Amino acid sequence: MPDGGIQWFNGCTKFLDGSTAGCVGNELAAWTQPGDREIGSAPRYVTQLRGDATRNTDLSLAKYFQLSERFKLQFRADFLNAWNTPSFGGPDAFVSDGSFGQMFGTSNGPRNIQMALKILF
């Protein structure tokens, strides 16, 4: 796979000069760039491509400590994207790009943990 991307679908494209891009092994071209003054010679952009589903789990844990009759202490820990599950970004949607159909990077952030203390009175 060129540039280390993930192939989401067959993005093998044949260009006007006969060269191909985005092909893996002996894969046949699934896309062909139209010639000048042919129907559909506008820049190709496939808008119906979808990326991976987002699977984030956020967790919060809290514990209350009674300090006195009037004061309470709350300890809280929040885990954002607790399982650190990646959601891959949308694929490159320009047919004329050499990386057409490949996905690079993730669309969600890494796991974040934050802790807090709060005095309630």
Image: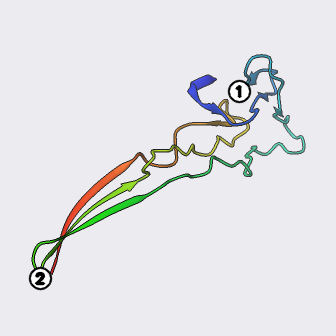
Mark 1 against mark 2, which lies toward the viewer? 2
Residue 70 bears which disc, if any? 2
Q: Nearer the viewer, residue 86 or 77?
A: 77
Task: Tell me the residue that label 1 is attached to.
Answer: 22
In the rendered image of this protein, does residue 54 appear above or below residue 63?
above
- The percent position of residue 31, horizontal first and vertical second, equals 82, 34
- The percent position of residue 73, horizontal first and vertical second, equals 17, 70
In the rendered image of this protein, does residue 66 appear above or below residue 29?
below
Quarter holding the N terminus?
A: top right
In the rendered image of this protein, does residue 49 appear above or below residue 3?
below
Q: Secondary structure at mark 2?
A: loop
Res. 2 image quadrant:
top right
Query: Between disc 1 and disc 2, whose residue precedes?
Result: 1
Q: Residue at x 26, y 65 (%)?
A: 63
Q: Residue at x 39, y 47 (%)?
A: 111
- The percent position of residue 6, horizontal first and vertical second, equals 62, 32
Q: Outermost residue, top direction?
A: 25
Image position of 65 (left or right of 36):
left
Quarter holding the C terminus?
A: bottom left
Numbered circles on residues, count = 2
Q: Amino acid at mark 1?
A: Gly
Name the image colouring.
rainbow
Q: Outermost residue, right direction?
A: 39
Q: Amino acid at mark 2?
A: Arg
